[in-house]
Image (cartoon, helix red, strand yellow):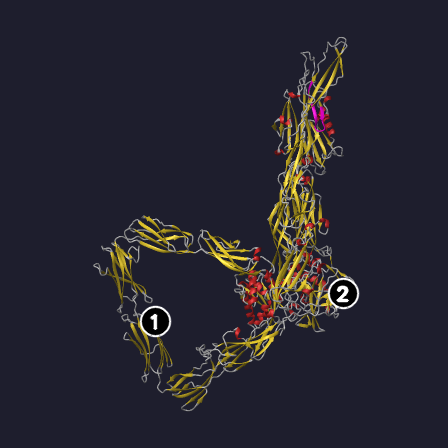
Amino acid sequence: MRRLRKNVSLWMIVIMFLSTVVSFIPATAFVETAFGAEMINGFDNPCGYNVQSDGKIPSGVRPCNEDGYKFNSKLYYAEVVMNEAGKKSPPRNLIVYGDYSSIPERSQNYKRGWQTDENIVINPAPNGEGHYYAYTTKYGGYTYGEFRYIGYTVDGSLYHNNYFIVDDDRGINLANKHWVFQPWKSLPSSYRHKPATPGFIYEDFDYSTTLPEFDKLLENIQRSIGFDITQGVAYSDRYNVLSGIPENRDPRNYMVVNQPATAREAGFGTMFHYSWASHSLWYQTFSFAKLKGPEKNAPPAACVVEPVQKQPIPLGKDRKVQVQIKETGTLQDQLMHGSLAAEALFYTRREISNWQLKLYDQQQAKNLNLASYTKADSVVIKENQGSGIFTLEIDTDKLDKTDPKMWKYTTYGEAVAIFANHTAADPNLSSSPKCNLDLSFKPAEKGVMLSDFNIIPQVHFTKKLSFDKEMIGYQDLSYGKDADYYIFEISNDEDGTKVTKTFDPAIPEIKKPKAGYLDQEAVRTFLHDYILTKFSESATGRKLKTFQIKQTIVDKDETTNNQSIALKTMIVIQDAPIEIIGGCANPNAVFPPAPPQYIQPEASWPLDWYDVVPFPVTDAEPGYIPALSCKSAPGYEDFAKKAFIDGKEIDVNKFFNGEYVFGEAALGIREVKIVWTAPDGTESFMIRHVVIHESKPRVSLKIEGTYKQNRTMMAYDRSAASNDQWVETNAPLEITSFSFVDTSDPNLKCRTGYCESNLSQKMFMYKKTGNYQMSIAAKRVINYGNGKSIIRYSDPYLVDYEIMPDHKPAIIAHAYGAEISRLDKLQLYYDVQSTDEDFIASKTLKVFYDANNDGTFETKVYETADDVTELPKLPKLGQYQIVVDAKEGTNQDRLMEFITPADDQTNTSSSYFFVDNYEPSSDLYLEVPNEKPDMDVFFMLDSNLTQSSTDYVKNNKVTITNAFTTGNMLANIGIWDMKTYTYDQPANTSKNTGSSYPSSTITYSSEGYSGTLSRTSVSNSPYNRDEGKYVSKTDSKTATDSCSNTVTTTYNQNGYANGSSSWSECPSSVSYSDGSYSGSLSRSGTSSSGSCPSSGGPKNGSCSVTWYASYSGTVYWTRDVWEPRMVSYDDYTGYYSGTIYKDVRQSYDASFMRAVQSKYVIYISDNTVSHLPDLQNVMNKQVAKLVLIGQNAIQAQIIHDKYIQNNKAIDQLVSDVIDHIGENNPAIPKVFKLVGEDVETHTATFDYEDDSIAADEMQIIQDPNHFDNSTGFDTFKGKSIILEKSAANWHTYQSIVNLIKPGKYTFFRRVKDMPTTDPNFADYAYYSNESAIEVFVHRKPVADVTLDFDYLLASNTYRTTWVDMSYDLDHNITRANTDRGIQARTIKFTNQTTGEVFTKIPESLPPGTYVLDYMAQDLEGVWSEPVQRTFVLPDTVPLQMKSNLKTAYSGFSLASVPASESLVAHQLWTRYPYSISLAFSMAGHISRSVPYYTGTKNGNDITWNNESFTIPSTTPDGPYTFTITGNGSVAGSKAAQTYAVQVETPIELSGTIDAVSGSASNVASLVVNEAYLLKAKTTKYANSATVTIFKGTPYQRNVTLTSATSQTTGYGQKNWTGSYTVGAIPNGFYTFEWRSTTPNGNSQTVSRTVEIVSNRPPAADFDWSPKPLYEGDSALFQSAVNDPDGNTLSVVYELTSPTGVKSSYSYSIGGPSYPAKGPALTLTLAGTWTMRMTASDGIAAPVAVTKSVQVLPLTVIGRVKHTELWEQHRQDFNVKKSGNANSPRGYSVFWAGEKFVLEADTTVTGTATRADRVEVQMGDYSAALIASDSARTSWKGEMWDAAFAGLARGAITFTFTVHYSNGTVKTDTIEATIDGQTMDIVGVHRKQ
């Protein structure tokens, strides 16, 4: 017998990668990805590839192959030590999945040493050389060498190791080998290396290898193998070389492409050759060289260029701007990427070496270039894209300015994807078409440069010499970094002349004394000199001239000059000199006009000030006030003053008294203007801008850290930066409080020196999670005036923040099953990770054994600190516990003075599995032992299969194996659970989002776990920044000046003036500058101290007079003023919590399969195949029969051998599978024995695990009714045998048995093994299958025979047919209509007269006596005892006859047929050689003779036609005899047959009265003077109907009715009608009698009582709504009454409750409309209510209507259930204990700590009444259920609390309460029992 054991290899392999160094190939783009991400390189990641633990993976490479093996990063990147001298191999760049150990041991082997690409074997003694370091018994220890296979290809094929030393090399040139043509087709299926296909590259082309699509592949193959194939053979004709046609020389027809080459990686393929020398088949592996450029097709590339900055791009003052441009190149490989076949034909993203990006600089007419191989270019490669950022310098002067509001720039880019192996000789790239770039710019309002200047608009002078250039007041206000030179033009409006001058270079941004500045003094001189040319030395009258001054600035561009022009007007006035005659004392003296009384203000105030501090202002008298000649100047106090802020007048006295406060609303730049009005009305002014600053302190703090418990956090004061810096400089704020708020919190720990007293920063930590707060406050003291101060305080500032948990390590110990045998290793996925940025400091996996089978796992049998994928074989039966302990460490900062070892997070996970016993196999046979079917069975469990079904299969491998054994089959079971199991782990994180409010969710990934976390809280640490700007402001004021000049006049001896001296007149204007303000002042007036006469002066003396000139004008101070703008910014941190998940899926593994003939794949689904490619892959690789379990649609998905509908429990489905497979089992051996014969049997026994056999038992069952005529049960070993197997009927095996009663017997044999002698595990001793044989004990048959004869006139003989009447008591009942169990007969026939003997009966015999000896054989082949019969054939021929009689209408019978109906004589047959007649009679009513035959005649046989007879309608009812007689014509031969006939003729009379008007039918009251119809109904047999009305009264009379037949079938129907009008009959009750008769004398009467009334009663009815009614509903009753006489009706309702309580309601309802009235009542009790309504017109008798009102109950039905997992635990527990899934723990028994699943059903009303809410109470715990359907009739919820683990053993009560919308409240109480704890089952408190 075959054993289901795994072969133990003769050698063990240990791989040691020594001194592994991982290097990277520069030309490869590598993928950085989230660990264990759902997708890597754009491919699904079902195998859970983890970049951190599994290694880097090249871009474009799949993380998993089709069978779920992971990419082998080491075989791609790692350098490996190859020998003891330390020789290293370079990285191999192989795309391999899995490794050498993934290969089944039967296929794998190892050789010391290696073979180079040049086929040179390197194998130095003693330890060899190679890429692997392995231990083998063959070489006596560790050696360096190679494995035959190093893993799998992406499509799951074996990956051949090209360095493996070939098995045999006979030195034959490759070109001379006989390569096998298309080996995938021609090689025999028995050849174990036969390829299924030529390679996946051909898959999409039906594996046609020589299509043009593969011509480039041909180039690569031919280049790689280096020889031409000229010796190809077909395997079927392998000793003849194929012809030399191209097809036979094409290597694609020979090469299996296992892995195509790429531009980055070599590939390999396999060819097969047949050796004519050794007459054997060999395979050889070839390397494919990396692709050259033309050996693959390149898909097109595309590019996109776009600005990084949002368009339109705003322009400033700069002429040249830099714009960042992002260019993205895309390789358009979307249709190829992901398809193995397409990727082999086309270059894809995985082979991109680098990207080159180009951007054309249109203005410079050159290309800008970026390349990914230049690190500084920062080109980013991701998937199939390469992107980079260009910086493009654009001259705004050269932009397209067609639209003045939107300037344009257009250019283009290009992208080139360069693939690996690209060379100039073999180019290998994909270039994109040009991609256009359109930029739009929004120009600045004033452009990038501006020409602007100031001049004094009006200038006065008298003498030409007094006109000074400073009086022009020119000041340049231009800007523009790109300006190069100035052009000035001045023209005179009066004569049209103009002059120009260029200043080059002259740049506005450069100031004196730097080279290139504008010489403004020279500009003034140029303007002054031109203006002077328009005036004379002096004027006799006023001259006014207007000048236009144009200033143009020009940029540096030599080809296209950009300009900015400013134009201003200046008026120059020359006045005539004033002649002064006379003196102060001379009233006739003429003085010049009084000068305007301009003053130069001496007021002053600060340029910056606080918002709420009084504004300090100083003032003083002006230094000069103009006065009239010979007059005193007015005093300063004579000037009126006004003050304005931003043009709005304020209290001038408060202003100058230093009492004015700007206020908090006046922040920013304010214009302060003071106007002084002189006594002569002249106004002087001063405008000076002041910046008002916010003085209230703003506070802010910043918190930094991980926000995790037991982690260091820092908090900093950042208030100073949040304030106005001028204020902060002059009055810095002072932090008054920087607090944790709840400083007494015991969970708060802070480092000494960084606690509450530290007002600048905190260093702290929290021991527990929670929401905490931190506050900060400040004040500002502002000193002003003489010792005055103002204190300002900050607003409250409180920051809420959250401290999140330090999570325990995530542990997955996912076993791929929970039941193994002693021959198996438990396969599992084992993973321990820290998911919150800590690390795993330690981990252990331990296995404990329940050695006493008492539920306690006390014996440790295994422990490891390493990663494992399987547990070792375990030799003992029973339950085991896996316990994983993990402890975290952290590199995150902690305040170690507060840290204890308990603060390091730990976690323990436990799970359980069983080691179970394979049951033994028994055999029971008669002569030759039975060969039991041996098979491999692979269960594939669909991912969408119900979890309980999945668990049943995967956790019962041994049980299912035993079930096959029980079914007399040997099964090797493999199970692939394709469900993806998601393990969850709590996660928290925080994210600072700055000014953006944190999103409601974020994605979080760590160590292969990922998920979406929801925001739990948000903290905000707002801060402020001054984002003001410098603004150019021009202050101005009135400025004055004066000039004095003394003139001395000399006189001659006559007193006449003869001359003057010191003549020097003051100029017409003067310049002004006080260091801030500047400008030019014009002379505004002249005054003098007196005058000297021209005569009469002092003789030979002199006279002196002082002249005073007054100057005034506006002077300006242009300055850059900082305009503060405090902007508040949020600084949000979001806190997130949720669950992250990691998926685990079992990989495909078919290594369990053996070389047996029978293989089955069982695919189980609840619906259809969810993983069709997986199933197809399995079926493509295995020669197996496929059984599909699912729904109907699954049948169309894949060809299969059997379909089973999934409509039953999983255990039954598995049983159906076993039954189906068992259909092909050898039939149960059968044997037939006669009663009393001995039955002898033989036995054989087999046990998988070689356990000893403790019992050998036998049981016999009997079906005593298997044969007809049962005689009951037999006995065995003193006990009666029974019909079915019984546990009490097993006996020790006995080889010989004698049975004496007929029946079907089944012999069963079973054995029981003894896997252990430990009594604690006695339950693990299993009985075997019950092998069986069937014994059929039967009886001999009984022979019998009779004779059928016909007389032949011609020969005077009888034609005979001998009728066999033999039977077998075993079959004569069930086969009574066929052979009665007889299959053969034998006879001996003797003529008594002649003595002649026959063994065959003659066809005819003469009259005489005959003896027949007869035997019969039964179906079992046994002959009867012989029987003898004597037959006499008479001389006189007898008449033979058959007949039958029936009614013509099938609805009647001979037992009851009415007169006038018909009878039919049928099946009439006679046999007689002479003429014959038939006669028919029935008691004189029927008589007929048929003298000649009718119908058909065949020889002496006549089949007569049917004869029909009508029973006369006058035939009285009663019994009759119908006789059929056959009369022969010779010798009085006669035969007769009689039939009983019963004649019964019904009338079925009924009578009614209807109103003629049709308003009423079947009335019982007749109203006087009303007309009525008298009606009757009868059968069709009646011939009269009358009504006697008012019978027995003086008013009696007869009314004859007339008939109309409405139905004729069967009894038929007649309707009778007559009319009658009620005359003057007194009120009262009268009898009306209906009478009907038939022709045969039958009659029938019916009568009824009729009331005669003169007043008609009312009609009454009522109804109610809604319907149906439920307890608590309000019902509205409504009357439906009327009175034909129009009387007012009294209506009374009487309601009776189900308990008998009555209540009444009365109404009066008048006609003619009779409105519906009735009570509206709330019916609170469920049950039958009775409503009686009585309507009365007060005359006729009241009419009462009574109806039952059914009030339906409202209910709630509660259920307390287990979770699906815990229900499975309960059933598993029970099965282990009792074998019964529901005993001993009933469904209502729970473990403490379980989650209670709550369900409730409420009443489905179909009305507006429905359940509003359902609540459940259990002790102090409650839960609210949620409706799961729109009708709110199904409710679900759950109840769980951590405290449930402590629930006491015993009963608990759940009270379900429902509240209905009509106010009804109902409850339901459910009892449950607590017994045990969840810890007993899973070892951890868990919410399940």
Secondary element at tag 1: loop
Instruction: Say if residue 1215 shows up in the picture.
Output: yes
Quadrant assignment, res 1513: bottom left
Q: Nearer the viewer, residue 1008 or 505?
A: 1008
The span shown in magenta is 1070-1086
- Please state the horizontal and vertical placement of residue 608, each as a whole percent of the image: 67, 32
> Which of the numbered marks, if any, corresponds to residue 1453?
1
Q: Is residue 1000 left or right of residue 1809?
A: right
Q: Is residue 477 left or right of residue 1175?
A: right
Q: Is residue 1074 magenta?
A: yes
- Report, in whole angstroms, how far the alpha carbon at label 2 lies from the one at label 1: 107 Å
Name the quadrant of the N terminus: bottom right
Q: Is residue 874 magenta?
A: no
Secondary element at tag 2: loop
- Given the current orientation, which residue lies at the most extreme top position? 1054
Mark sitting earlier along the chain (2/1) = 2
- Please state the horizontal and vertical placement of residue 742, each as a whole percent of the image: 63, 45
Name the quadrant of the C terminus: bottom right
What residue sits right under mark 2 in the picture?
Answer: 129
- Crowding at dot 2, Cα within 10 Å, few <14 / some 14-19 / many 20+, comes out as many
Q: Nearer the viewer, residue 446 or 1694?
A: 1694
- Please state the horizontal and vertical placement of residue 33, each as a whole percent of the image: 66, 54
- Placement of 994 over or under 1510, stated as above or below: above
Most common secondary structure along the magenta stretch:
strand
What residue type is disc 2 on? Glu
Q: Nearer the viewer, residue 409 or 784?
A: 784
- Placement of 19 over or under 1537, stated as above or below: above
- Please state the horizontal and vertical placement of residue 1260, each as a whole percent of the image: 52, 76
